[in-house]
Structures are given as structure tokens and as C-alpha cells.
Image: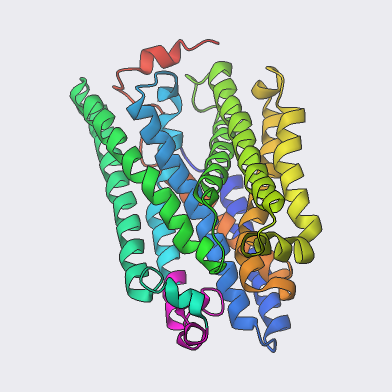
């Protein structure tokens, strides 16, 4: 069945973009005279481009995981996963633009290790200069983004080819490529988070940080996947998707929210209890300036899924899944916000028209791109070898 974007969806996404642009313009007008104006704009660009790109990347990871484990149930929702992963080329463009702005402005007081004057007076940054310098940073960034793009193009091309040719040869090639991708992703998902996010707090590091950001990426992706699947089902698409598929997506959402919560608490508890000055500074900055937001974010992402998605029925209920999903997404946007501005802007950071406007504009564009991606291929793969197993999936 071919997907066509409903008029309401077009109006909704365009409204988000227009309202976002309008709010952003108001925010710019209100804050143009501030000394941190440029830093604030670039910081929000980094927050939103990273947040939405990570969701597309999380979908690519989840797709590769299904290939590598030869999972059967997911075949009926495979095109939904591919549509979200299809944001990757656009996300790469956004990330590159933000990284260029940061490089040109010597870090915009966000990546202080890019500022020669700061480095000249900071021995600790000088000790990390072999790794944290513009040239090597760009080499790593290009390698990350190129790897993700190449794997995405390969998976998509073979998926469409499988619809025409059938058989098992393409499936087994995806199986091998999926395993290869997971090897790269195991390294790059951590090192890229060090480069793009953790280096903002250049004096600080955590061996759990890569896992922490990965968990946030994964749960945000699962929320988008289950919400999008429910939306398509409501419109009468995806007839082969049953309550068991929704249940599985709900279980993934439930499980990954607990994974993120576990890593949040593990990182916090170990560092806070050890009370080593070089480590606790990360939390002191955030608790002093974002106390309510910081702990509310944990409560939102832990308590809501635990209380509302515990039962089997809740994991199959579209209303509960959608409500919890929206709450989780807002919570993880706040996570990205605090990770970026906590180490760069500190007490001067605020959530105003600029932050809300840019987030809404990015969200509208993100949703529109995903919906367009859904129109480019049949919503159900034609010759996937596990399609029959997926159609008869029952738990």
C-alpha cells in the first residue's frame, strides 16, 4: 500500500515550522543586544541538530540490530524504521552547518578548546590538544558522518532491490552488513558523543557518557517509531501490523527508558559519592543552575514509563503510548539542552522564545521529512523472507 501524506499532516508540520520560525524571530528580536546572543543561537542549533539527527541514527542502529539478529517480528514495521533512518542525510547537513559555525567562531564559547586564547591560558586543555583540535575534530566528524551515510544508503538500496528480486541473497548481505555496522557504531556512538557533547565540559570526562547518550538516543528513537506506527495504523495503513507488533515497540520503549534511567543514576551516583572535585563540577554546575529541570528530567523519563507502561494492556494502548512518548521526547530534548548549555552558558542560559521556536521548527521539518520518506516505497516490504513470520506474530 502506497502512503500519501494527509492534508492535516501537511498543515500540522507546516504550522510547526511557521510557529517555530515566528518564535525564533521574536527571540532574536528580544535578545539581539545580549552579549551571549551568538553563542545562544549556535548552542540551540547544536542542541536541535544533535537531538533530531540522533533519532535518525538510532533508527539506523535499530534496523542494523534487526538484520544482525535475524529478527522476524519487525518485518511488518521495517519501512517505518527506514523512514525515520532516512532523516540521516538531512541530519548530516544540519550537523555540518552547526559544526562549521562553531569552527568559524572558534567554538563560540561552547567548544572552548577551539579558542586559541583560552587554550593558551589553560594547561589542562593544552594536555588534550593532540586530540581536541579543529583538524582532528573534523577528520573524526567526517568519518562518523560518512560511515553512517554509506551504511544507510546501502541498507536502503538493498531493501528496495529486495522488493523486486526476492530470495535470500540480499537478506544475508544485510545480515553481514548489519553486523559490520554494529561494530562501527559500538565505537563511533561513544567517541562522537565525546567530541560533540562531552568536550563542551572540556575539563570533565566520564567513562559512562557514551553509553548514557546512546541510551537517550535509543529511547527517543523507539518513541518516534511507536508513535509513527500508531499514526499510520489510525489512518488505515499497515494492515499487517497487529497488537503484538505495537506491544513489542512498547516493550522496547519501556526497556530503553529504564536503560537510560539506570545509566543516568549510575553516572550521577558514582561521581557524586566519590566527591572528586574534577568530576563533581559537572553536576554542581547543573544542579546550581538547572536544579528543577535536571531532576524533573530524570523523573519524567523514569517515573512516567514505569507507572504507565508497566502492564501488557498499556503497551498496546495507542493513547497511553502516545502520551508517554510525547512526555519522554520532551524529557530527552531537555537532556540534550542541559548537556549543551550546562557546560557552555551556565547561569546565563534560559528557555525562551528562541529555544522553543528553534525546537518547533526543527521538529516540524523532522516530521515532514519522515512523512515524505514514507511515500517513496510500499509501506510493507514485498519479498522480505521473514514477512510471513511477522504477519503471524503473536505474543
Q: Nearer the viewer, residue 278 or 191?
A: 278
Q: Nearer the viewer, residue 202 or 317?
A: 202
In this view, 362 is above or below 129: above
In this view, 355 is above or below 239: below
Per the picture, the main secondary structure of the magenta-coloured stretch is: helix
Which residue sits at x=35%, y=38%? Answer: 182
On the image, the x and y values in percent for residue 381 come to 35, 27
In which quadrant of the rendered image does the C terminus lie? top right
Using residue 368 as the reference point, say whether residue 78 is left or right of it: left
Which residue sits at x=64%, y=42%? Answer: 266
Query: In this view of the protein, can residue 378 be seen by the observer?
Result: no
On the image, the x and y values in percent for residue 180 come to 27, 38
Provide the residue span drawn in magenta: 98-121
Q: How many marks?
A: 0
Q: Is residue 101 magenta?
A: yes
On the image, the x and y values in percent for residue 364 come to 57, 55
In this view, 39 is above or below 177: below
Q: Is residue 196 magenta?
A: no
Quarter where residue 246 is shown: top right
Using residue 319 as the reference point, say whether residue 174 is left or right of it: left
Query: In this view of the protein, can residue 47 be seen by the observer?
Result: yes
The image's colour scheme reads rainbow
On the image, the x and y values in percent for residue 206 come to 55, 54
Which residue sits at x=56%, y=16%? Answer: 244
Q: Nearer the viewer, residue 381 or 341?
A: 341
Amino acid at each position: 500500500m502506497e502512503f500519501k501524506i494527509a492534508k492535516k499532516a501537511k498543515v500540522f508540520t507546516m504550522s510547526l515550522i511557521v510557529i517555530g520560525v515566528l518564535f525564533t524571530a521574536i527571540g532574536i528580536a528580544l535578545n539581539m543586544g545580549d552579549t551571549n546572543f551568538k553563542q545562544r543561537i549556535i548552542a540551540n542549533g547544536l542542541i536541535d541538530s544533535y537531538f533530531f539527527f540522533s533519532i535518525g541514527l538510532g533508527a539506523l542502529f535499530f534496523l542494523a540490530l534487526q538484520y544482525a539478529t535475524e529478527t522476524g517480528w519487525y518485518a511488518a514495521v521495517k519501512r517505518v524504521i527506514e523512514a525515520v533512518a532516512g532523516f540521516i542525510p538531512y541530519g548530516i547537513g544540519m550537523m555540518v552547518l552547526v559544526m562549521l559555525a562553531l569552527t568559524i567562531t572558534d567554538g563560540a564559547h561552547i567548544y572552548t578548546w577551539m579558542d586559541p586564547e583560552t587554550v593558551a591560558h589553560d594547561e589542562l586543555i593544552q594536555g588534550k590538544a593532540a586530540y581536541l583540535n579543529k583538524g582532528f575534530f573534523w577528520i573524526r566528524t567526517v568519518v562518523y558522518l560518512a560511515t553512517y551515510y554509506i551504511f544507510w544508503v546501502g541498507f536502503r538500496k538493498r531493501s528496495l532491490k529486495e522488493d523486486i528480486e526476492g530470495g535470500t541473497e540480499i537478506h544475508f548481505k544485510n545480515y553481514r552488513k548489519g553486523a559490520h555496522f554494529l561494530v562501527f557504531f559500538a565505537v563511533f556512538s561513544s567517541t562522537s558523543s565525546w567530541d560533540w557533547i562531552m568536550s563542551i565540559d572540556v575539563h570533565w570526562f566520564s567513562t559512562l557518557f557514551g553509553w548514557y547518550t546512546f541510551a537517550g538516543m535509543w529511547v527517543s528513537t523507539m518513541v518516534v517509531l511507536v508513535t509513527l506506527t500508531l499514526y499510520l495504523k489510525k489512518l488505515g495503513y499497515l494492515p499487517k501490523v497487529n497488537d503484538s507488533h505495537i506491544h513489542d515497540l512498547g516493550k522496547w520503549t519501556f526497556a530503553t527508558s529504564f536503560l537510560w534511567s539506570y545509566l543516568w543514576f549510575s553516572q550521577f551516583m558514582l561521581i557524586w559519592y566519590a566527591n572528586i572535585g574534577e568530576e563533581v563540577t559537572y553536576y554542581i554546575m547543573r544542579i546550581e543552575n538547572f536544579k528543577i529541570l535536571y531532576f524533573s528530567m530524570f523523573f519524567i523519563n523514569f517515573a512516567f514509563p514505569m507507572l504507565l507502561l508497566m502492564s501488557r494492556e498499556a503497551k498496546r494502548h495507542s493513547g497511553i503510548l502516545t502520551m508517554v512518548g510525547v512526555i519522554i521526547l520532551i524529557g530527552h530534548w531537555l537532556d540534550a539542552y542541559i548537556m549543551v548549555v550546562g557546560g557552555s552558558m551556565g547561569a546565563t542560559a534560559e528557555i525562551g522564545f528562541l529555544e522553543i521556536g528553534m525546537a518547533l521548527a526543527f521538529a516540524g521539518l523532522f516530521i515532514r521529512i519522515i512523512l515524505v520518506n514514507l511515500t517513496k516505497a510500499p509501506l510493507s516490504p514485498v519479498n522480505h523472507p521473514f514477512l510471513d513470520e511477522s504477519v503471524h506474530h503473536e505474543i
